[in-house]
Amino acid sequence: MYRFFLKRILDLIISIIGFIVFSPLFIITLIFLLINNNGNPFFFQKRPGKNEKPFIIIKFKTMNDRVDASGKLLPDDKRLTRVGRFVRKASLDEIPQLINVIKGDMSIIGPRPLLMEYLPLYNAIQKTRHKVRPGITGWAQVNGRNAISWNKKLELDAYYILNISFILDVKIFFKTIKKVIFSEDISEEGSATIGRFKGNI
């Protein structure tokens, strides 16, 4: 009952209330990023959703588009702006995803939506992450976030799929608040973001 019906209702209620509550932060962040990113405050990217159906994720843009001499984007840590670093540390970049939840693309809690190019790289167990809507936060995020390996992260996502419940979601919700307050596990050690998933090698 919870997984197939109540979870979506709670998603709608929480995301609508959350968007209203965080609207002042949304507007302030929007203004700062409009200035910092030359009028381009949002990041849009195609991601796989439930049943691997693509959708466009919405986030605040924390990195610029600087390229090297050959036209290739610079590494993430070279493109992460000063304002973007603060926005990411405070997890403010995730606020626009409440729009994705309201639209039905995402859930408040579930496996994080990764890149489309990773789809062929998953094994059978890892593929189960697409049986549900992806989430703004999830079991992997409160158990290491970007500070753990890809295999561990995907293992935690698979665990969540097998054990979805109201109690587990409540636990993840409050652990997420703690992570955000203390800015824990935001990035892989020595890097601005986690490295790319290269498959099970």
Image: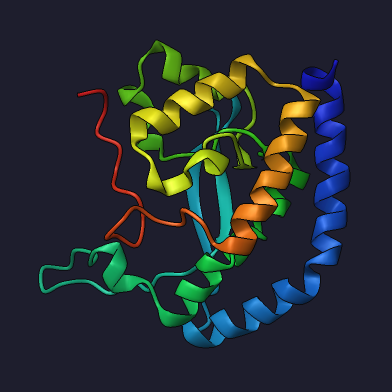
Residue extending furthest toward the left:
70
Classify the position of the N terminus by image quarter. top right
Q: How many marks?
A: 0
User: Could you say where residue 2 lies in the image, as x and y percent from the top left?
Assistant: 83, 21
Residue lying at 56% horizontally and 49% vertically, measured from the top left: 57
**Scheme by which the image is coloured:** rainbow
Q: Quadrant of residue 137?
A: top right
- Residue sitting nearer the eye, 25 or 139: 139
Q: Is residue 181 left or right of residue 85?
A: right
The image shows residue 165, relative to residue 82, as above or below, that is above
Q: Is residue 16 left or right of residue 111?
A: right
The image shows residue 124, relative to residue 79, as above or below, that is above
Q: Quadrant of residue 19?
A: bottom right
Residue lying at 88% horizontally and 45% vertically, measured from the top left: 13
The image shows residue 46, relative to residue 86, as above or below, that is above
Kindly tell me whether residue 51 is visible in this rendering.
no
User: Could you say where residue 66 lies in the image, as x and y percent from the top left?
Assistant: 28, 74
Kindly tell me whether residue 126 is visible in this rendering.
yes
Classify the position of the C terminus by image quarter. top left
